[in-house]
Image (cartoon, helix red, strand yellow):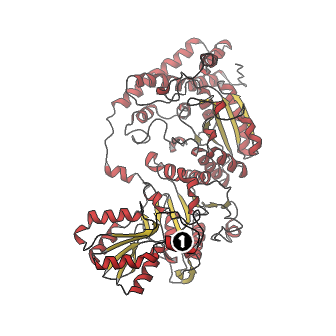
Amino acid sequence: MNFDPKGRSKKELLHIYRELVTPRLIEEKMLILLRQGKISKWFSGIGQEAISVGAALALRPEEYILPMHRNLGVFTSRGVELTQLFEQFQGKAGGFTKGRDRSFHFGSKAHNIVGMISHLGPQLGIADGIGLANTLQKSSQATLVFTGDGGASEGDFHEALNVASVWSLPVIFVIENNGYGLSTPSAEQFNFESFVVKGPAYGMEAYSVEGNNILEVLNELEPLIASIRKNPRPIIFEAKTFRMRGHEEASGTKYVPKELMEHWAAKDPIENYEQYLLKARKAKKSELEDIKKGLKADINTAVKEAFDQPAVEASMEEEIADLFAPYELQAQPPKSERTQELRFVDAISEGLRQSMEKYPELVIMGQDVADYGGVFKVTEGFVEQFGKDRVRNTPLCESAIVGTALGLSIKGMKSVMEMQFADFVTCGFNQIVNNLAKIHYRWGQQADVVVRMPTGAGVGAGPFHSQSNEAWFFHTPGLKIVYPSNPIDAKGLLNAAIEDPNPYLYFEHKYLYRSLSTEVPADYYTTEVGKAALAAEGDQLSIITYGMGVHWAVETCADMGISADILDLRTLLPWDKDAVQATVAKTNRVLVLHEDTLTGGIGAEISAWISEHCFEHLDAPVLREASLDTPVPFAKALEDNFLPKQRLKHKIDQLMRY
């Protein structure tokens, strides 16, 4: 290897050596502990240290870096305290995740590190969001995110690079090309020699370096990072290297040809850098040995301190409390009694507009939301008032944009992302259920994101524009779900969701957009999340429902002359158990109604809870009515047959006759 110091002093070169050898010595210790059964798993970065260390040293401490599971050098070079690092690896309470996640699945706000999840790729979209925040905040900072050659096959890779290019985001995408994705060689992952060919396709610069040469990594990265601070743009940075151990220790390396292992063993980043320092008379062997000796002592001390800590003890209260960032839910009334008649869609738009005025750090993102105003015209006119920086059209890439929203939150901003149709959320599902929902529980990072979900049938839109998919997320701890049935709640619940620094799915029924109007307070206000409301009061039975179900229940009961409590849940996570219990105790007969399909729907959980907690109040079985267990059909006769409205009268009659 050719090492070019670029005028660095001996002190600087020795500092680089210390940072380079630290992760290697930690890994050697970890492998011993693994063989002793004292840690459960290890993902080795031996042979790849120069990339992690070089990237971390090239950035300023305040600039965010997003590593993966072979980037121990990022954490050590950022000065992560070793005892806490080892507590993390051992699942101790003092680790970054309090024992809730393993190895490198953590971040540290104090060190501007955002950790990975097991699904390779989502961190790339988060880097976009951090880059976007840097651009909007005019901070002149770069962001660096890692992926591997295997992870670059994920759709998240394409989405994130495309968004970064379209928006000229100051993000370095480092691709560690180590030749294998677990055991699958590169030739079976992609059909090119180097990732530099990706650059022209995305309209961005692309570079490839010898990833085992620490000085080459630094010499190439430092000017690029300095450049994008002044001229924001994304860059592909391929570092060619090799993984000298298994994907994780249990998998081994038997699938790797012996000559290939020997070739890369000769390119060991630490041994080669040591030889350079000695030959160039930048260090004496005794100096290098003293550095290693001191590091080993520090490592051994930290390991002992971590092992001396007691095993983590479970606390149900703490586990539940850490699901969400601390926030006190309080309804804020309007300042005046002024009202205006608004359609459902206009109430959503008004709430969003007033929230944009209240929070200058709030950004709206989605397909066609800017000049066009969104396909349902919710954001019509917003560009004129707030500008295109804050009202952003996005490419067709739901996963990257949810990730971008999370990245904005990491930098202290708020975001509302519009899914053009709730059905399209499948393309961003992983980001929602594995990143937004789990990130605070895992390492205390809030996700200040609202995802708007235009939902529901009754408009002849067929199987892919009509689904009610709230139950998919109802099963996911760490999310909050609201589902208004009227314009007043539509505005108040949206404002409340935006205020709350936790992740929300905000469902808004398309049928109600222009079919329902009412007087709505003109001023800004919020509706308390987690509280149900009675849409009608009676004493013969209770119908527990939400969304369109509220209107079907009110209409059907009026037609039948039934006196019923119609409880509008309004919030699905958390749902109002006290209100449910009160209405069950009052009427003793309960029907749970929702537009979603019957099997596995939210009604099943509510019915089970009532049977478990309110059994003594029941004079009849808890009944459910919902849509058919089929996709949503297109033709009107088929769609009417699918929806529960026409079966509701029979179900009420059945309950009353029991």
Question: Is 242 or 321 nearer to us in this picture?
Answer: 242
Question: Is 17 or 644 nearer to us in this picture?
Answer: 644
Amino acid at pointer 1:
Glu
Q: Is residue 429 visible?
A: yes
Drawn side of residue 616 relative to residue 628, left or right: left
Residue 151 lies, with reference to residue 603, above or below; the image says: above
Pointer 1 local density, CA inside 10 Å: few below 14, some 14–19, many at least 20:
many
Residue 486 lies, with reference to residue 160, above or below; the image says: below
Residue 258 image point, x, y percent: 59, 16
Residue at x-position 56% and y-position 15%: 287
Residue 511 image point, x, y percent: 56, 74
Residue at x-position 64% and y-position 23%: 13
Residue 55 image point, x, y percent: 63, 34
Where does label 1 land, which residue? 639
Quadrant where the N terminus is found in the figure? top right
Residue 23 image point, x, y percent: 53, 26
Residue 277 lies, with reference to residue 89, above or below; the image says: above
Drawn side of residue 539 relative to residue 236, left or right: left
Residue 610 lies, with reference to residue 77, above or below; the image says: below
SS class of the residue under badge 1? helix
Residue at x-position 67% and y-position 60%: 392
Q: How many marks?
A: 1
Quadrant where the C terminus is found in the figure? bottom left
Residue at x-position 61% and y-position 27%: 50
Residue 558's quadrant in the figure?
bottom left
Q: Is residue 491 visible?
A: no
